[in-house]
Amino acid sequence: MAIQWFPGHMAKARREVTEKLKMVDIVFELVDARIPVSSANPMLQEIIRHKKRLILLNKADMADPEWTKQWIQFFSEKNHKAIAINSQEGKGLNHIVKSAQELLQEERERRKAKGIKPRAIRAMIIGIPNVGKSTLINRLAKKNIAKTGNTPGVTRGQQWIKVGKDLELLDTPGILWPKFEHEETGYKLALTGAIKDSLLNMQDIAVFALRFLQKHYPERLKRRYRLDAIPDGIVELFDHIGKMRGCLISGGEVDYEKTAEAVIMDMRMQKLGALTLDRPEDIIDQDP
């Protein structure tokens, strides 16, 4: 999958993140709990590596809870603090400030020892488009400050947002990297809505989704599409789903494009339940 998406505003955003990093105490890296590594920007990892980092596993309600626990443990073993949140419903947000204070405790004590007056924690929120940054900011600030949308690229500029007396947030635009090193990363981002559908071959994405379900969630696949057994051939599986969902063209033939769209929407709308697409064992050699 050759997806190249690095328009001018994203190149500018990278420069701005680099410049503003010295103004903050900690970075809040917002990722999708369903794809904690695929939705993490490796370009940003390089930029923020010298800063304290709190990983926020957003949309945790849409992720498999057992795998979310494993991901939190995985990050802990890599010396990264991670917490699961649901910014849409406000769940887990009360742990953010507390976790940031714990990560910055030594630094805050050093400042206190020098007689420097305590101040609110200054944090930068980073993340790829459509991961939920604006929703999180609005929840934390308890008002509509950041623009929200269900398509990538809503946030454009940077702004400071006060969250009570303990936290000040610096929002940043969502940033994607120039290209995906692994084809699977693109598929996973597509399934979770981080990439505009117009950039993709929907049938390729649906094939990836069905193969993933067949391997990791076969019972859910069978239940959703009323299968006694999962066909070995992908065409047979498409045919079954297309007929079952009424995705047909004249003459009763299966419309594969509509079938692909139906499968993708089923994944996004949680018709197959809460799913986790990234697995720690798949990326064990990486250092997120």
Image (cartoon, helix red, strand yellow):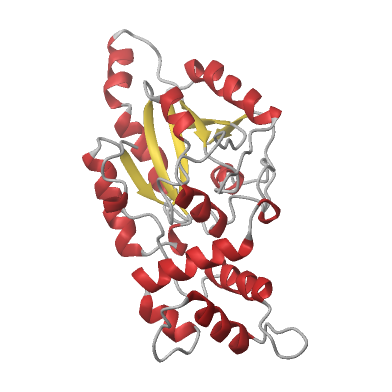
User: What residue is rendered at 30% in x and 33% in y?
Assistant: 102
Q: Which quarter of the figure is the C terminus placed in?
A: top left
Residue 247 can be seen in this image:
yes
Q: Residue 20 at what x, y percent from top left?
A: 55, 19
Residue 165 can be seen in this image:
no
Direction left: furthest residue = 77
The relative height of residue 183 versus residue 50 in the rendered view (above or below) is below
Q: Residue 92 at what x, y percent from top left?
A: 41, 52
Direction right: furthest residue = 250
Between residues 279 and 162, which one lies in front from this camera angle? 279
Direction top: furthest residue = 114
Looking at the rendered structure, the number of numbered marks drawn on it comes to 0
User: Which of the 4 image quadrants contains residue 239?
Assistant: bottom right
The relative height of residue 164 versus residue 23 in the rendered view (above or below) is below
Q: Residue 21 at what x, y percent from top left?
A: 49, 20
The relative height of residue 258 versus residue 102 in the rendered view (above or below) is below
User: Which of the 4 image quadrants contains residue 246?
Assistant: bottom right
Residue 157 vs residue 121: left or right? right
Between residues 278 and 28, which one lies in front from this camera angle? 278
The relative height of residue 61 versus residue 239 in the rendered view (above or below) is above
User: What residue is rendered at 52% in x and 67% in y?
Assistant: 207
User: What residue is rendered at 56% in x and 62% in y?
Assistant: 204
